[in-house]
Image: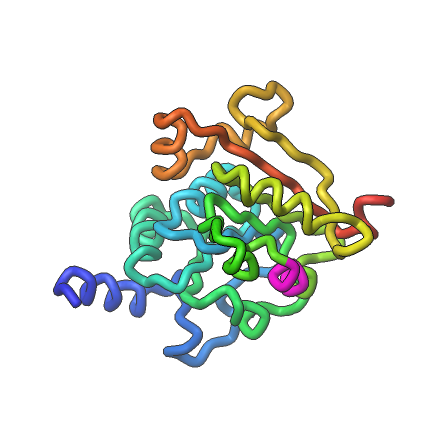
Amino acid sequence: MTRRKLERFADITAWDHVLEPRNTEYNILDFIDFSKPLIVELACGQGAYTVSLAKAYPDHTCVGIDIKGNRIWFGAKQALDESLENVRFIRTDIESLTAVLPRHCIDELWITFPDPHLRGSRAKKRLTSPRFLSMYKELLKPEGSIHLKTDSPTLYYYTHEVSIPSQSDFVITKSLWDVYHQPEAPSILTSIQTPYEVDHLAKGRKVYWVEMRSKKQSYQ
């Protein structure tokens, strides 16, 4: 491990706005202000989207989740440098999130440009697969939403397939197959871009978006 990585790991261990559940005792109620609406980004990488969401929604708490501490450091450092009080990062794997966060605490769940796991044998690892959707049901508030933003048509259409009402607790309430060329796209989708997204767009790739809600909520 390089000296720079070791320094970054030391930083995130010391920072109050980064939580490493495996390495410390904690009270999640002291770490996150649940009196504010909660936005969580899964597999946040370097945290660019998490930080941008926090700027767009200053009255919300925005939490980035990733297992890679070396990645989280970038977003956590930016939040520190810009004195963003509503940003938090948790270094953990997604499968362990239900052991870290209380049930039904999340208002919005964002999944931005995740690994699409294109091989069919790896479909269970896709972050919109049934096993993950079942976990999200435990974490989201009844009126909560899931947002998938991706450049993968495979993941986009797969998410539609697994959201068939007769087979899923979630249904798709909004869907765009080309975010940057459809005027009905919410501004939050085009005003925030990760470095990866900038690269995707430069290569002429489409960006897809799906919003999902629980069946009960979507039919009210």
Residue found at x 26% / y 66%: 9
Q: Which residues are magenta?
A: 130-136
| Residue 15 rendering spot, x and y as whole percentages | 33, 64
Which residue is nearer to you in this view: 119 or 213?
119
Q: Residue furthest left?
A: 3
Residue found at x 37% / y 39%: 196
**Is 50 left, or right, of 1 in this rendering?**
right
Q: Is residue 157 on the magenta stretch?
A: no
Quadrant of the snapshot with the C terminus: top right
- Quadrant position of residue 193: top left
Number of labels in the image equals 0
Residue found at x 32% / y 47%: 78
Q: Is residue 51 above or below residue 134?
A: above
| Colour pattern of the rendering | rainbow
Q: Is residue 134 on the magenta stretch?
A: yes
Residue found at x 50% / y 59%: 122
Which residue is nearer to you in this view: 86 or 9?
9
Q: Is residue 129 above or below residue 207?
A: below
Q: Is residue 35 visible?
A: no
Majority secondary structure in the magenta region:
helix
Which residue is nearer to you in this view: 33 or 77?
77
| Residue 13 rendering spot, x and y as whole percentages | 31, 69
Which residue is nearer to you in this view: 31 or 193?
193
| Residue 77 rendering spot, x and y as whole percentages | 30, 52
Quadrant of the snapshot with the N terminus: bottom left
Q: Is residue 179 visible?
A: yes
Q: Residue furthest right?
A: 220
| Residue 63 rendering spot, x and y as whole percentages | 49, 55
**Is 195 left, or right, of 117 in this rendering?**
left
